[in-house]
């Protein structure tokens, strides 16, 4: 299997494969791979064989014990589930041929179920699992379980005259102002490594806001941007929300922003992935309040 530095045109191959799957995770998003420092996009390698696509990347920085002695991290192969075990075995063989310890990050449950006899360490971290919702639930907000969300939207509609429209390049300074206001309200410290990475990811995501299948919208009250959201629709027809920031001084702003993005942009998807909570208890409670139907599970596979 021949790995080369990834190129933008490789995502056309990925798109063809992913469109035949029901893959719900965010790992194979070009936006995700390019925006986060963790992946070090310029050094990502790509390979393609027998309708199976592979990505691996070197670890430029990580002091977590789980990654000790690991040279490359592989993403779960993009393929039909029936080929997942074959693909993981092929990736593992390649790692060993290259003289590396095998490790794969973000592996979904349906892949893991096929690999339990492969003599691998298999672990899961709750803070990495991505929350999944029925699109219809987040649009309609029906039933008792969404009573408080409907109230938030009703309060917003009563208090404010608003506009919800696509983000433009001219909005960038005001959107960045919104981010800085949000940072201060959250007590963020971009001197901390993980929060600095988040800041970089947001800036790069704004640079990519006009790429294919990426959608960015602003929520406006009194000619002021009080909410910003950015997401995409994957080739497997899953809506992924990458960024969602709002000014909480405006009553119901987050719920309104979420609902408008779902009904405007993601309405033709079946599922919405609102990503992981990263171990943040406040974020966890917020994601749970929207009543997920399940999770895109994230397992870590590696050689013993």
Image (tube, rainbow, N blue to C red):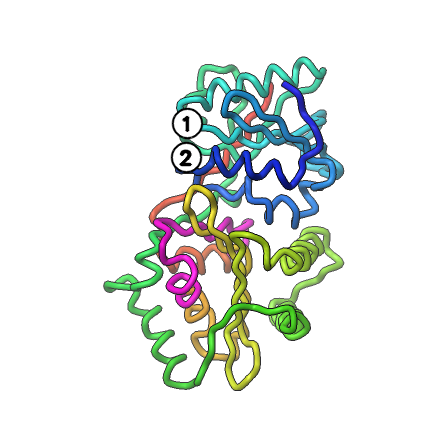
Residue 21 to residue 280: above or below: above
Residue 33 to residue 103: above or below: below
Residue 15 to residue 228: above or below: above
Which of 183/199 is in front? Answer: 199
Which numbered circle lies on residue 226?
none
Question: Which residue is pictured at 52% across the width and 15% down the height?
Answer: 119
Neighbor class of circle 1 (other Cα within 10 Å; few <14, some 14-19, many 20+) is: some
Q: Secondary structure at mark 2?
A: loop
Neighbor class of circle 2 (other Cα within 10 Å; few <14, some 14-19, many 20+) is: some
Question: Which residue is pictured at 52% across the width and 68% down the height?
Answer: 166
Rounded to the nearest angstrom, the CA distance separating label 1 from label 2 is 8 Å
Residue located beneath label 1 in the image: 81
Check the image and name the residue furthest to the left.
143
Lateral position of residue 268 relative to residue 62, left or right: left
User: Disc 1 or disc 2, which is closer to the eye?
Assistant: 2
Residue 206 in percent (x, y) is at 64, 60
Question: Which residue is pictured at 23% across the width and 63% down the height?
Answer: 143
Labels 1 and 2: the sequence-earlier one: 2
Asked if labels 2 and 1 touch by Cβ distance under 8 angstroms, the answer is: yes
Residue 71 in percent (x, y) is at 72, 26
Q: Which residues are magenta?
A: 259-281
The quadrant of the rendering that contains the C terminus is: top right
Location of residue 251 by image quarter:
bottom left
Residue located beneath label 2 in the image: 21
């Amino acid at each position: 299997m021949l790995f080369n530095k990834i190129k933008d045109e490789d995502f056309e191959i990925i798109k063809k494969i992913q469109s035949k799957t029901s893959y719900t995770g965010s790992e194979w998003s070009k936006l995700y791979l390019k925006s986060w420092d963790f992946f070090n996009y310029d050094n990502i390698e790509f390979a393609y064989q027998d309708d199976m696509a592979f990505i691996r990347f070197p670890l430029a920085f990580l002091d977590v014990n789980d990654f000790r002695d690991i040279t490359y991290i592989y993403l779960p192969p993009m393929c039909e589930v029936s080929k997942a075990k074959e693909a993981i075995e092929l990736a593992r063989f390649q790692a060993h041929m290259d003289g590396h310890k095998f490790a794969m990050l973000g592996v979904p449950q349906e892949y893991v179920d096929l690999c339990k006899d492969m003599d691998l360490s298999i672990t899961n971290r709750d803070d990495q699992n991505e929350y999944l919702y029925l699109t219809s639930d987040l649009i309609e907000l029906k039933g008792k379980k969404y009573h408080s969300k409907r109230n938030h939207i009703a309060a917003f509609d009563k208090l404010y005259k608003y506009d919800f429209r696509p983000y433009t390049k001219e909005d960038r300074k005001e959107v960045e102002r919104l981010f800085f206001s949000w940072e201060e309200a959250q007590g963020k410290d971009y001197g901390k490594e993980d929060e600095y990475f988040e800041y970089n990811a947001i800036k790069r995501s704004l640079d990519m806001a006009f790429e294919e299948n990426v959608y960015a919208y602003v929520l406006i009250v009194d000619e002021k941007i009080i909410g910003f959201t950015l997401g995409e629709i994957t080739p497997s027809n899953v809506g992924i929300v990458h960024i969602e920031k709002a000014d909480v001084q405006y009553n119901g702003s987050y719920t309104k922003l979420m609902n408008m993005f779902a009904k405007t942009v993601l309405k033709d998807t079946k599922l919405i992935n609102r990503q992981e909570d990263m171990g943040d208890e406040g974020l966890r409670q917020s994601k749970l309040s929207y009543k997920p139907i399940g999770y895109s599970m994230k397992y870590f596979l590696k050689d013993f």
